[in-house]
Amino acid sequence: MAQIVEVKVPDIGDFKDVPIIELLVKVGDRVMAEDSLITVESDKATMDVPSPVSGVVTELKLKVGDKVSEGTLVALIDSADAATEVGAGGTVAVATAAPEAAPTLAAEPAAPSSTAAPVAPVAGVGADFRPGDTELIPTQPRVSMPTAADRLPGGAAHASPSVRRFARELGVDVAKVTGSGPKGRILQSDVQAWVKGVINGGAPVAAPATGSGGGLDLLPWPKIDFSKFGAIEVQPLSRIKKISGANLSRNWAMIPAVTYHEDADITELEAFRVQINKENEKSGDKSAAKLTMLAFLIKACVKAMQKYPEFNSSIDGQGDEMRLVMKKYFNIGFAADTPNGLMVPVIKNAESKGVFELARETGELARQAREGKLKPADMQGACFTISSVGGIGGTGFAPIVNAPEVAILGVSKSAMKPVWDGKAFVPRLILPLSLTADHRVIDGALATRFNVYLAQLLADMRRGML
């Protein structure tokens, strides 16, 4: 004989008036025991209220946006053989809670099954992906959901608002992500895994026809008739800017990069550089190159890379075949400002060259870059790049890693600052360093150690002799 079971909201802790964000069933649907009926979301957790029995939904007492508390009637289910013991009066209250994990720098979501997501979830991505919203999955039957190709874009995907918001921030259409949660629910780890698949060269979904870089569904570039607002002049982008723009867009979208800042005291180093240049000028030795701070930076970066070899590496391969290539040579690229755009000549085998030779070679390559005479070989093979805007100004910036390198050093304008020496404030020449690193290879601790050691070398180049 048919039995009407009342499903009520159970004890959900101190939460009251929690809004309903999703109705997962409709009147007439047949549900199995433990199938979720509604989803509610507080400021701390997302919770599903499942059916305690198998049967047919005869009535829904709530709608999206309604607020519920413990004891609120959710639905009536007609069940001939309830799978769960029914309490007195035919009232049952069961819920499955899915607390949101607090963000951490090294959180690693559990890997979904191979049929639920194209690749393993992203690991330790730090500030690039934001761990959180990880849901605790109860043991229950999996319900097959429509494939991404069968869904309407975004709207029909089974995901909470927080997961949808996370996906939007990454430019991902949640309708193209396969969920691994209850009833195919899309978790934040599923979105992370989908993005990881794109980064590793997988093709879970074809990129949209509008083109969006890295296979992510970014909004198409706006098409605006600027002449409606006033006079305009259209100028073509240089070939260099077109090529570098595509590379920069790829690197920005596909590398989980973090920038670390450090101040280097270069008071003594700058005084030494000026002194040597004056001595050479006074002696009339025209064969000696004029020492530049860039030459010392290259020398110091090579020493730091030798101490921390991860900075002289590159990621090779994709997915499970991904590996780290450790290089035994030290080729340093440096950004050169030219009339046609930014170019990056490369100093080959910098570890075997002295400061004068580095100064001479960087000066010659910079001249060729400005004159448009660089050969392709002059811009290939870099292990690490230095981008200095110190001649212009600035106190810090976040340079974009130049793939397949794993780090880049940004250098801003040096300035005299008061520094406490234990007894008094003394004027010191401070050089701001901004190190951007690929977090897949270089974590925060390693990047900070590199930055600190580099600053120590610049403060006293004698350390490089140790």
Image: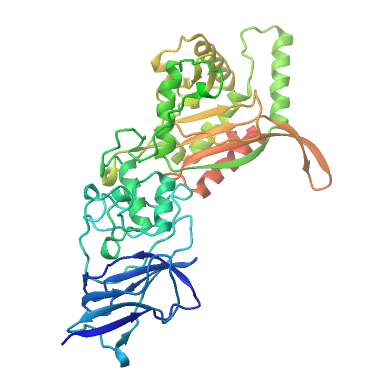
Number of numbered discs visible in the structure rendering:
0
- Image quadrant in which you'd find residue 285: top right
On the image, the x and y values in percent for residue 99 come to 42, 68
On the image, the x and y values in percent for residue 347 come to 48, 21
On the image, the x and y values in percent for residue 339 come to 54, 13
**Quadrant that contains the C terminus:** top right
Q: Residue at x 47, y 10 (%)?
A: 372
- Image quadrant in which you'd find residue 291: top right
Q: Residue at x 71, y 25 (%)?
A: 272
Report if residue 236 is visible in the image. yes
Determine whether, in the image, residue 398 is placed left or right of residue 243: right
Examine the rendered structure and indicate whether residue 214 appears above or below residue 242.
below
Q: Residue furthest bottom?
A: 88
Q: Residue furthest left?
A: 1
Q: Which residue is drawn at 39% across and 62% down?
A: 134
**Quadrant that contains the N terminus:** bottom left
Report if residue 463 is visible in the image. no
